[in-house]
Image (cartoon, rainbow, N blue to C red):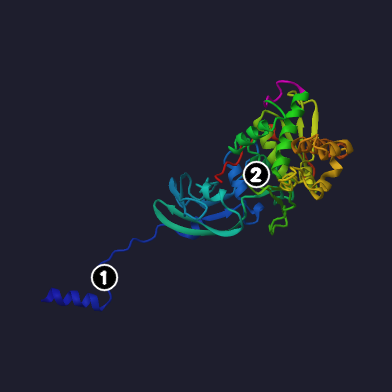
């Protein structure tokens, strides 16, 4: 009975038998800090994350960092980054050798790449860091980020020291010579009879020009038109970015702005063994390619000219009874063919396919000449490695630094 009364007395006075271990480490002393690189202004670019996954350049880019002050010699630090829509749980462990010393680390988050590939609009995400010292939870920090569309390509930014940082290498991630659609495009181009095979530089400069024209003719026949979409909702005052469509998006939508079309053509050129270059100027971009494997002779191509003539509409206008395209449709392409060619077609001495070749050859010649004077005037700016408004993006050279972004459609 006395023991029973003693137990009741303990309960009545609020005392329990649960033993709580006192905290060993003071969060103020440890001073755990988790930060996102301030140069990016709390903006996360999925394309940059994907590009950095295969980046082999000399410049080191870090997105996150965390720091701690060691509360004792040989303390064991463990930092856990919680799972989010963009990353898996990430755990890093380090030994803090000296008490009182502040250590800084740059974690490699385990990204959910399959989710990053699919981001088509901006959103918000919380990245949470938890600090443990010798298995004791010491502190928690949360970073809220504004993530962008995977189509948004970072071009440059002004860093915390007031210096421009060059991200031209990121363009090369959108050029995808490995895309499976390219095999179908090459087969389709060969079926059109313009050339018998794609041989790269094996048969000389004239052969290179014919191969590029074969691609040009295919693109015009497919009806890829110019679309001026390039703006983003990027709120940053320090960074410059542009919306770029991926290869399969151009192929499916049949829409491309100047940079989209350059990326599209450059991807196919890389596949067939040619060496493309993308020239970026303020508010415009156009394509170049070397006509020889020694990279001595450069040819240019204004890719937006593919949209000057709508060949699918011309084909749809063909009347079943006459087998001829309508006068209204012919009037739209009249300026791209000679009087003799048009008369021959109307007289039934030329097929629609032959007429279309006349049209695409005229436009290919225009596209090849369109930027020559402009390129000559700006060549010194392209050669300036410190220029961020005029950029010469040599895809072969950039491929040594970064690989294509491969994504599922």
**Mark 2 crowdedness (10 Å alpha carbons): few <14, some 14-19, many ≥20:** some
**Residues under labels 1 and 2: Cα distance?**
71 Å
Residue nearest the observer in this picture, 93 or 352: 352
For disc 2, the marked residue is 251
Which quadrant would residue 293 be assigned to in this image? Answer: top right
Residue 118 image point, x, y percent:
56, 51
Query: Which stretch appears magenta?
Result: 197-204
The residue at 86%/36% (across/down) is: 372
Left or right: 65 in relation to 377:
left
Of the two numbered discs 1 and 2 on the same chain, state the one appearing first in sequence: 1
Question: Can you say whether 143 is above or below 348 in the image?
Answer: below
Give the main secondary structure of the magenta stretch: loop
Left or right: 290 in relation to 111:
right
**Mark 1 crowdedness (10 Å alpha carbons): few <14, some 14-19, many ≥20:** few
Residue 213 image point, x, y percent:
75, 33
Question: Can you say whether 144 is above or below 108 in the image?
Answer: below
């Amino acid at each position: 009975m006395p023991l029973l009364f003693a137990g009741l007395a303990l309960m009545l006075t609020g005392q329990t038998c649960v033993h709580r271990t006192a905290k060993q480490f003071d969060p103020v002393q440890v001073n755990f800090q988790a930060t996102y690189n301030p140069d990016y202004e709390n903006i996360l670019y999925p394309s940059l994350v994907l590009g950095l996954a295969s980046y082999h350049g000399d410049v080191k880019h870090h997105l996150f960092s965390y720091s701690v002050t060691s509360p004792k010699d040989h303390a064991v630090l463990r930092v856990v980054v919680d799972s989010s829509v963009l990353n898996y749980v990430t755990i890093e462990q380090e030994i803090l050798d000296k008490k009182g010393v502040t250590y800084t680390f740059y974690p490699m988050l385990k990204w959910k790449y399959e989710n990053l590939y699919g981001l088509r609009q901006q959103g918000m995400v919380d990245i949470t860091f938890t600090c443990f010292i010798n298995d004791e939870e010491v502190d928690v920090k949360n970073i809220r980020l504004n993530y962008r569309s995977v189509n948004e390509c970072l071009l440059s930014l002004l860093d915390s020291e007031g210096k421009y940082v060059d991200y031209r290498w990121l363009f090369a991630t959108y050029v995808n010579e490995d895309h499976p659609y390219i095999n179908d495009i090459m087969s389709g181009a060969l079926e059109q009879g313009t050339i018998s095979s794609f041989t790269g530089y094996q048969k000389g400069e004239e052969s290179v020009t014919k191969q590029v024209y074969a691609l040009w003719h295919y693109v015009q026949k497919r009806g890829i038109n110019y679309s001026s979409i390039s703006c983003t909702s990027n709120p940053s005052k320090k960074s410059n970015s542009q919306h770029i469509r991926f290869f399969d998006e151009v192929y499916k939508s049949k829409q491309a702005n100047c940079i989209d079309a350059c990326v599209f053509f450059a991807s196919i050129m890389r596949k067939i063994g040619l060496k493309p270059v993308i020239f970026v100027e303020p508010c415009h971009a156009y394509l170049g390619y070397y006509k020889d494997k020694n990279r001595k002779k450069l040819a240019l191509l204004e890719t937006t000219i593919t949209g000057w003539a709508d060949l699918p509409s011309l084909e749809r206008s063909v009347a079943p009874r006459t087998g001829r395209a309508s006068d209204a449709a012919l009037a739209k392409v009249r300026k791209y063919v000679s009087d003799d060619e048009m008369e021959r077609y109307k007289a039934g001495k030329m097929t629609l396919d032959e007429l279309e070749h006349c049209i695409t050859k005229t436009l290919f010649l225009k596209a090849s000449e369109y930027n020559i004077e402009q390129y000559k005037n700006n060549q010194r700016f392209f050669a300036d490695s410190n220029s961020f408004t005029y950029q010469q993006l040599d895809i072969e050279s950039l491929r040594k630094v970064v690989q294509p972004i491969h994504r599922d459609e």
